[in-house]
Amino acid sequence: MSASESQPVEFSLYTDAKGVWHLSHVGVDHVGVIAVRAFPIHAPNEGVSILSQEGKELLWIDRLDALPAELRQDVESCIQNREFMPEILKLDSVNSFVTPCRWRIQTHKGATELLLKGEEDIRRLNSNTLIVSDAYGVQYLIKNLAAMDRHSRKLLDRFL
């Protein structure tokens, strides 16, 4: 049994009227906190750190699923304020196989375009997981390359 499961929850996380996140922990209210996943892709429910505005760790959460449902939802909402990594579900088209090139894609957030500066902006995390960084700094995730449709895999093969 981990420490987070054996002890009662001793913190609260909430937003004020301006949408600023607060952490109330051991009698102290910390203003402007952010929540960061330690392993956002491989273990998104394990290891979350609550950081001060200065980047100092204020609280460590071993497992999100060990938290009460309402508090877990608050932590996940705080994480979403910082994390933005759309998942690429399908490649509709690529305007060129020479970089830089524009990709028309479908993500879990909807259709969009990205500008790929170079092939080095495609990072393979494992045999099925890729991160694609566009020219504007947005990172896109391909969770399961093997599960993508044939057309998308064929387009991606030109860059891998």
Image (cartoon, grey):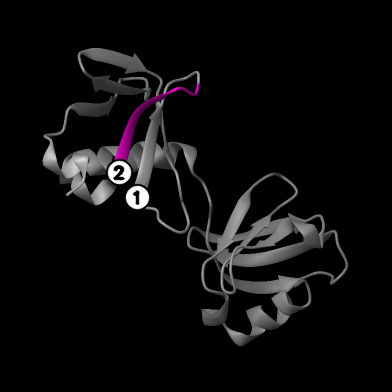
Question: Which quadrant of the view contains residue 68?
Answer: top left
Mark 1 nearby-residue class (10 Å; few <14, some 14–19, many ≥20): some
Q: Which amino acid does label 2 sit on?
A: Asp
Tags 1 and 2 touching, CB below 8 Å: yes
Q: Which of marks 1 and 2 is nearer the N terminus?
A: 1
> Picture coordinates of residue 108 (x, y %)?
48, 62
> Picture coordinates of residue 134 (x, y %)?
71, 52
Which region shows up in magenta?
55-61
**Closer-to-camera residue (132/64):** 64
The quarter of the image holding the C terminus is: bottom right
Position of residue 146 in the picture relative to residue 12 (left or right): right
Task: Name the residue: 27% across, 47% down.
Answer: 64
SS assignment for the magenta stretch, majority: strand
Numbered mark located on residue 46 in the image: 1
Question: Which quadrant of the view contains residue 88?
Answer: bottom right
Relative vertical location of residue 46 with respect to residue 93 in this rendering, above or below: above
Q: Name the residue under label 2.
A: 62
Q: What residue type is labelled 1?
A: Glu
